[in-house]
Amino acid sequence: MKIALMDSGIGLLPAAAAVRRLRPDADLLLSNDPDGMPWGPRTPEDLTARALTVALAAAEHRPQALIVACNTATVHALPALRAALEPGIPVIGTVPAIKPAAAAGGKVAIWATPATTGSAYQHGLIRDFAGEAEVTEVPCPGLADAVEHADPEAVDTAVATAAALTPPDVRAVVLGCTHYELVEDRILAALAVHDRDGLPPIVFHGSAEAVAAQALRRIGARPAPDADPVGTLSVLLSGRPGALPATALGYVEGRSLAPTAAAL
């Protein structure tokens, strides 16, 4: 079984690690775009073109599924990716976990890139899935770039800025960018300084686990966390065979995947 994941950079690590936990025997192919990153500032048309190039490079290696492990690419490029690859290769997009976060009611914050915050796309998700929950959209300028470059000082600065915009009594935080799941511990530490006055701990909602599970469902595979032997990890860098970026090793997810790296 081979599952490909795509993103402009290392935001695909949480979903890749989640697939590895569910199916250790899966061969993983990480296809990212160092030549074209970041994708966020690009026009929808330009971003779609970059995403198609990255996806088609992965498709040449015949994966059983392709995970679009990027919220921005899902917003703008998912229809084009599906038109190009399905039905031969199922394409699974990444959507912020607003519905499960809102299910328990109370206040919910959505941390997302400035381009996504306030967008018609995110407003549509809130309208369709937030129910009666009170939702605050929190822009996080610079956070994805700081995570991508594994710059802890820049991460802490961006997280502190976003934390200051987050209501102190939120019950749940939706991580609306795949990069943010790599620094969930730093986000929690920043929000913990709020006086919660007996409120329960904040619950975080990322997308990695749900996306990984959906990929398995699409190919008719069941979770098998004890499966053996462990599959390989291969990397494409803007279509070229390469190695796991050094910055990936700054995160638990990257270090967990590194031992299975293999050349294409």
Image (spheres, rainbow, N blue to C red):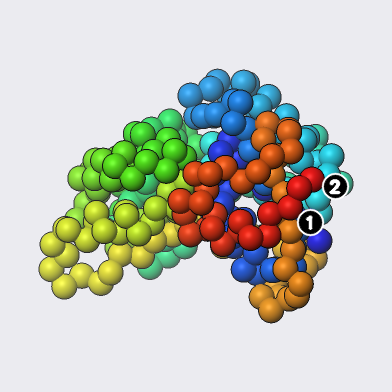
The crowd level at tag 1 (other Cα within 10 Å; few <14, some 14-19, many 20+) is some
Front-most of residues 64 and 197: 64
1 sits left or right of 49 in the view = right
Mark closest to the chain's N terminus, 1 or 2: 1
* Quadrant hosting residue 213: bottom right
> Residue 62, labelled with which disc?
2
86 sits left or right of 108 in the view = right
Q: Please state the total of marks drawn on the protein image.
A: 2
At 39% across and 61% down in the image, what residue appears? Answer: 204
* Quadrant hosting residue 155: top left
Is residue 131 in sight in this rendering?
no
Q: Name the residue under label 1.
A: 2
- What whole-number distance in Å separates the C-alpha atoms at marks 1 and 2? 8 Å
Mark 2 falls on what kind of element? loop
Point out the image quarter for the N terminus: bottom right
At 32% across and 55% down in the image, what residue appears? Answer: 186
At 47% across and 54% down in the image, what residue appears? Answer: 251
**97 is higher (above) or lower (below) than 235:** below
193 sits left or right of 36 in the view = left
Q: Are marks 1 and 2 in contact (CB under 8 Å)?
A: yes
The crowd level at tag 2 (other Cα within 10 Å; few <14, some 14-19, many 20+) is some
Q: Residue furthest bottom?
A: 226
Percent x, y of residue 115: 43, 31
Kind of residue indicated by mark 1: Lys
Is residue 72 in sight in this rendering?
yes
* Quadrant hosting residue 112: top left
Kind of residue indicated by mark 2: Arg
Percent x, y of residue 238: 68, 31
